[in-house]
Amino acid sequence: MTRRARGETPEDNPEIERKECDVKSAMKILAAGALLIMMGAAAASAQGAGARSMTPAIMVKKDIPYVLGGTPLQTGDLFAPRTSTLHAAILLIHGGAWKWGTRNDPGVTYMAPRLAAAGFTVFNISYRLVEQGGRFPDDLEDCKTALAWMVIHAKKLRINPKDIFIVGTSAGAHLALMAAYTARTHLFPATDFPHVALNVKAVVGFYTPTNLMLVNGVPHNSWAYKVVINYLKAWLVKHPKNGLLSASPIAYIKTAVPTLLLQGTQDKLVPPVLAETMKNVLLAAHQPVKLIMVHGVGHAFMNFPGRVRKIALRETIQYLRLQLQK
């Protein structure tokens, strides 16, 4: 961001009486102040131009629908490198406990243009939330429909349909893993494009609810229990015995894809044990996985400016680039 130039107001000189104010001295002070303002503005302008020149040119298209005749929530923003070559692509999914949040949340809006600047075409989507008809699995089917939309329009988007990743935060990370792990199955098909072959190269989850069965161990009057049970309300009616497990990424280990998990050690909403358990289960099934424990931070650390999210994004980009080499 470009800093505003600040001009300093000259302090009054107690040694000069107002009635004997030297006009020439006053003019010099005013001129000096104006010069400082001009110099500050020029420096700020140069800083802004330098920042822009350091970022490769990207193209941004807003409010693209990915569902035929869908709602405003079933749209996304496209961030793409302004080049004619084919790129790998990323489906980016925001969090918000499945009932809040938008694609304008600070975590995903921080990542989207920077991932595009790193050479990826990014589709940052919204999806139906709990109060807008988005209870599980409707929101998951939205995400898989967005994935299918990317495949169908791969040529126009200049993306390689074999190099598509999914990245999600919190509840969006739950949907990211669910979409990635079931992409090549008949489960939870894309609403408008059920016959489109889906392939996910790898998935990245930030502070991911990997096993919703965890709510069995918390008080029924707790916020976490109420959120999860409300989210799965219709699903649990249909699947009373295994509804919590079948709505969890940990149930689909056999069809998993390479996975990067980033987890704060001080997270009180999504306990670190979920990430650690997921890593161990994936490894036991001989599925590739990497877990990065981010020490000293809590939930939603990608929402906050600072060194932590810069490093986390750098690790994410390095991981995705490594997967492209395989």
Image: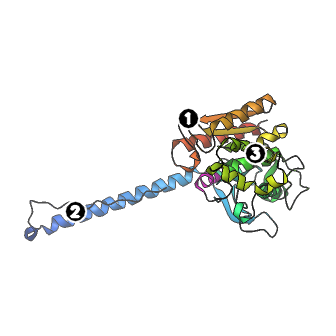
CA separation in Å, label 2 and label 1: 52 Å
Question: Mark 1: which amino acid?
Answer: His
Question: Mark 3: which amino acid?
Answer: Leu
Say whether residue 42 is left or right of residue 284. Answer: left
Which residue bears the numbered disc 3?
177
CA separation in Å, label 2 and label 3: 63 Å
Which residue bears the numbered disc 2?
29
- Measured as percent of width and height from the top left, residue 249 is found at 77, 43
Which is nearer the N-term, disc 1 or disc 3? Answer: 3
Q: Identify which residue is drawn at 77% across, 36% down.
A: 325
- Measured as percent of width and height from the top left, residue 6 is found at 35, 59
Secondary structure of the residue carrying numbered label 2: helix
Where residue 232 sits, quadrant-wise, is bottom right
Quarter of the image containing the C terminus? top right
Question: Mark 2: which amino acid?
Answer: Ile
Where residue 26 sits, quadrant-wise, is bottom left
For the view shown, which residue lies furthest in the front direction? 220
Which residue bears the numbered disc 1?
295
